[in-house]
Each structure stands twice: as structure tokens, then as C-alpha cells.
Image (tube, helix red, strand yellow):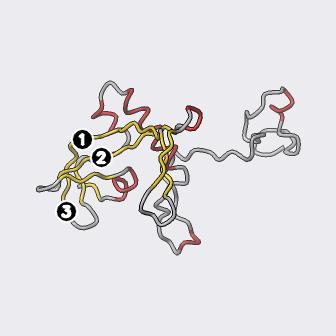
């Protein structure tokens, strides 16, 4: 018995005995990495610097896109997600958020350069090899130009 509950850790825990795979903190799918939604803590081995990069940023970004597209109030969603509307960029520029862009991308063909690199071969991909993804960008205005920032860049800017 530990922390108020009783089970053995070798067999996957008491819930595993009920034949419910993957339930509980002794998850039987140990090879699968969890999605990181929380703010990461400082790593004491890194000399006290913040982690900065989330281990599953692609999953966080995909979930952000899914939620943002389904949100009935985009501004409130951005506030809940703590996306700053006004920031100071690392170069000191003051930026104001104008737009959130979500692009849907499908790779439907490949090119292979021929020897020498002057020409190439093009091949369309069969349906099972077509890859699809979404790209998320935050468009900020710096007073003269538009700047497209990704989620990691937005999170590293200092909010005003």
C-alpha cells in the first residue's frame, strides 16, 4: 500500500486486473509519450535556465489549432490560451497581434534531383503517401511591417 491505495506495480495495477488497458497511473502503454499541457519547470541540470521548449510542442500546437477553429469567440480563446495581444520582441520591437492564420497543407508530389543538380524528376504521390498538416502563425504588426511568428516564438516574447 502506498499513497492511500493498494496494488502491485508489476502487473499494471489493480485496474489492469479489471481488463481496462491504459487506465490508471500504471499505464500499460509505457512506450507512448504523454502530451505536455502544463508549463514546464526549470531543469536544475541546465544551469537554472528555463526549459523553453515543450517536449510535445507539435501536439500542443495541433490541439491549439483544433480548439481555435472550433471556438465561437476567437478573442476569448486567445486569452484563455495566454496568447499575448501586445508583446515586445527579442529585438525590442513593440508588436500588436492582428491575425491568427491556420494553413492546411497537403504534400501531393515529390521531386528528386538528377545527377549534377540541373534537372529533376517529379512524381505525384499515391493517396496513401500524401501527407497532411496544418501550420499555425500569429501575425503581429511592428509599426511598419507584418511579422509572422510561430507558437514557440510568441511564447518567448515578453507581454506588454
Q: Please name the residue shown 38% across and 41% down the image.
A: 81
Q: Please name the residue shown 53% across and 37% down the image.
A: 130
| Viewer-proximal residue among 3 and 51 | 51
Q: Which image quarter is the C terminus in?
A: bottom left
Classify mark 2: helix, strand or loop.
Answer: strand
The numbered mark, 1 or 2, whose residue comes first in the sequence reads 1
Residue under pointer 3: 93
Q: Which residue lies most toward the top here?
A: 72
Above or below for 113 versus 98: below
| Viewer-proximal residue among 106 and 143 | 106
C-beta proximity under 8 Å, tags 1 and 2: yes
- x and y, in percent, of residue 116 in the image: 47, 67
Q: Which residue lies most toward the left here?
A: 144
- x and y, in percent, of residue 106 in the image: 45, 37
Residue under pointer 2: 138
The alpha-carbon separation of the residues under discs 1 and 2 comes to 6 Å
- x and y, in percent, of residue 156 in the image: 36, 59
Q: Quadrant of residue 34?
A: top right
Above or below for 30 versus 145: above
Residue under pointer 1: 99
- Judge left or right: residue 33 versus residue 17: left
Amino acid at each position: 500500500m502506498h499513497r492511500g491505495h493498494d496494488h502491485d506495480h508489476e502487473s499494471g495495477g489493480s485496474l489492469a486486473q479489471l481488463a481496462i488497458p491504459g487506465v490508471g497511473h500504471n499505464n500499460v502503454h509505457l512506450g507512448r509519450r504523454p502530451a505536455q499541457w502544463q508549463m514546464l519547470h526549470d531543469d536544475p541540470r541546465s544551469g537554472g535556465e528555463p526549459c523553453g521548449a515543450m517536449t510535445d510542442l507539435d501536439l500542443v500546437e495541433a490541439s491549439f489549432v483544433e480548439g481555435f477553429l472550433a471556438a465561437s469567440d476567437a478573442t476569448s480563446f486567445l486569452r484563455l490560451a495566454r496568447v499575448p495581444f501586445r508583446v515586445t520582441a527579442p529585438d525590442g520591437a513593440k508588436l500588436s497581434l492582428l491575425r491568427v492564420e491556420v494553413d492546411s497543407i497537403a504534400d501531393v508530389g515529390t521531386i528528386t534531383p538528377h545527377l549534377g543538380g540541373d534537372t529533376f524528376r517529379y512524381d505525384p504521390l499515391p493517396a496513401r503517401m500524401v501527407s497532411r498538416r496544418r501550420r499555425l502563425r500569429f501575425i503581429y504588426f511592428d509599426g511598419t511591417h507584418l511579422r509572422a511568428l510561430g507558437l514557440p516564438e510568441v511564447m518567448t516574447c515578453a507581454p506588454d
